Image (spheres, rainbow, N blue to C red):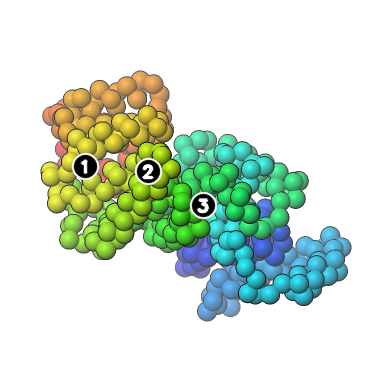
């Protein structure tokens, strides 16, 4: 990859959500906005090698995309009508006009999570236009085929266009209906930032930080929703370890080997405060912990433990059991197996993993063979463990993850 390609990729990772949000606000069409932004990216690859990278690359891309929007309207013979509309908007509104959601990116998320779309389409479209994730990355996050993601995104854009969904903040009375999808998208964004599904970097901090920012904005908008605070707590706890999760050269550092003195204690306290708010709001509404609050409670156990050995693994097992009943998934069950291995030994955990394998769960993912390899190694079944770890390495799409798995296999 050339230096210019790397620069364009970095700019897109950092600026894509704001560029698409700005264009969606201008055009009123989320699908068109993303198409225009992609065309501007192509122009950057063409012009920047000769002219150099502009000082404000995000502004350059936005300006080029806006010009393309005007060209599009001209071709559609609607430029005069659009100019009249813009002029009317400028005369009728002011910059200080109150908006229910005063954040273009959050507005974009709520728009892409419109009830006219299915939940699956909402999530796929938002991950594409807000995070700028590729269809391959989204497919790995959602554990579905790439073709399925592509179909969902194409259908979602067509549906929003056919329904003439405007780019505007929904009324507060409509937020709750969209909240589940919005939280799901923010959670998946953070997940991709916390442990990248592919590429050369183990952590994509710009995506994780944007997800955390969006979560904090949502907490301010919806202080009476316990799961919003639960998700913020989870992200605060997980982000607190970023400084210790990779070495200077980018090599991943496993939890058992991390220097806990490098964990961000202030961020851990923010996470604990957010979890307390989630619990208090939940009690006030007469409900227990939800999906994100339970995950936050698990993360809190790790965050406050002095070491891996002193971690309250029995409590973590119980929390995973509760999470599995509330939001069952093979990933939750696999994580429970890891906790069981720490609390009760690898043999009991291996039984859980083998059940998942026999059911065909997580087929094609590196997660199951990597955990199975670890458990077999603990039981002294070295050859089997090495085989599982090499299988996991072959399946892993992240370069750093692949290297860690191969190193483990070699160490056996």
In this view, 137 is above or below 367: below
Closer to the N terminus: mark 3 or mark 1? Answer: 3
Spot occupied by residue 256 in the image (x, y as percentages of width and height): 18, 47
Point 67% across, 42% down: residue: 116
Q: Which residue is mark 1?
A: 408
Closer to the N terminus: mark 1 or mark 2? Answer: 2
Real-space Cα separation, disc 1 to disc 2, in angstroms: 45 Å
Whether residue 265 appears in this view of the structure is yes
User: Does dot 3 land on a helix, a strand or a loop?
Assistant: loop
Where is the C terminus found, in terms of image quarters? top left
The nearer-to-camera label among 2 and 3 is 2
Position of residue 379 in the picture relative to residue 198 (left or right): left
Q: Nearer the viewer, residue 91 or 172?
A: 172
In this view, 143 is above or below 399: above
Crowding near the residue tagged with mark 3, few <14, some 14–19, many ≥20 C-alpha atoms within 10 Å? many
The answer to the question of whether label 3 and label 1 lie on touching residues, with beta carbons closer than 8 A, is no
Disc ID at residue 195? none
Q: Nearer the viewer, residue 98 or 91?
A: 98
Disc ID at residue 133? 3
Point 41% across, 33% down: residue: 327
Real-space Cα separation, disc 2 to disc 3, in angstroms: 37 Å
Crowding near the residue tagged with mark 1, few <14, some 14–19, many ≥20 C-alpha atoms within 10 Å? some
Closer to the N terminus: mark 2 or mark 3? Answer: 3
Point 26% across, 33% down: residue: 318
Position of residue 131 in the picture relative to residue 302 (left or right): right
Q: Which residue is mark 2?
A: 283
Spot occupied by residue 171 in the image (x, y as percentages of width and height): 63, 54
């Amino acid at each position: 990859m050339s230096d210019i390609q790397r620069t364009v990729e970095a700019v897109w990772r950092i600026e894509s959500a704001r560029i698409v949000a700005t264009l969606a606000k201008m055009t009123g069409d989320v699908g068109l906005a993303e198409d225009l932004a992609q065309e501007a990216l192509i122009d950057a690859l063409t012009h920047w090698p000769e002219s150099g990278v502009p000082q404000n690359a995000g502004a350059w891309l936005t300006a080029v995309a806006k010009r393309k929007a005007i060209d599009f309207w001209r071709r559609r013979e609607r430029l005069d009508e659009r100019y009249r509309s813009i002029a009317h908007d400028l005369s009728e509104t002011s910059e200080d006009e109150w908006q229910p959601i005063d954040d273009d990116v959050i507005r974009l998320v709520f728009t892409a999570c419109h009830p006219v779309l299915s939940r699956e389409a909402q999530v796929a479209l938002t991950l594409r236009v807000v995070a700028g994730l590729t269809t391959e990355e989204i497919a790995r996050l959602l554990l579905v085929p790439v073709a399925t993601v592509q179909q969902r995104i194409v259908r979602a854009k067509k549906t929003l266009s056919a329904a003439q969904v405007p780019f505007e903040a929904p009324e507060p009375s409509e937020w709750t209906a969209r909240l589940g999808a919005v939280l799901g998208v923010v959670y998946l964004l953070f997940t991709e930032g916390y442990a990248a599904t592919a590429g050369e970097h183990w952590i994509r901090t710009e995506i994780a930080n944007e997800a955390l920012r969006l979560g904090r904005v949502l907490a301010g908008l919806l202080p009476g929703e316990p799961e919003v605070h639960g998700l913020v707590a989870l992200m605060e706890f997980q982000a607190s370890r970023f400084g210790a999760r990779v070495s200077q050269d980018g090599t991943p550092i496993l939890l058992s080997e991390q220097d806990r003195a490098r964990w961000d204690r202030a961020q851990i306290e923010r996470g604990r405060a957010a979890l307390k708010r989630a619990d208090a709001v939940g009690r006030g509404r007469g409900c227990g912990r939800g999906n994100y609050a339970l995950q936050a409670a698990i993360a809190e156990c790790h965050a406050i433990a002095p070491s891996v050995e002193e971690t309250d693994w029995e409590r973590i097992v119980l929390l995973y059991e509760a999470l599995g009943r509330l939001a069952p998934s093979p990933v939750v069950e696999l994580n429970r197996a890891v906790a069981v291995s720490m609390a009760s030994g690898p043999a009991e955990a291996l039984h859980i993993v083998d059940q998942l394998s026999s059911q065909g769960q997580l087929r094609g993912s590196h997660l199951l063979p990597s955990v199975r390899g670890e458990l077999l190694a603990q039981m002294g079944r070295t050859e089997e463990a090495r085989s599982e770890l090499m299988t996991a390495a072959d399946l892993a799409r992240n370069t750093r993850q692949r290297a860690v798995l191969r190193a483990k296999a070699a160490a056996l």
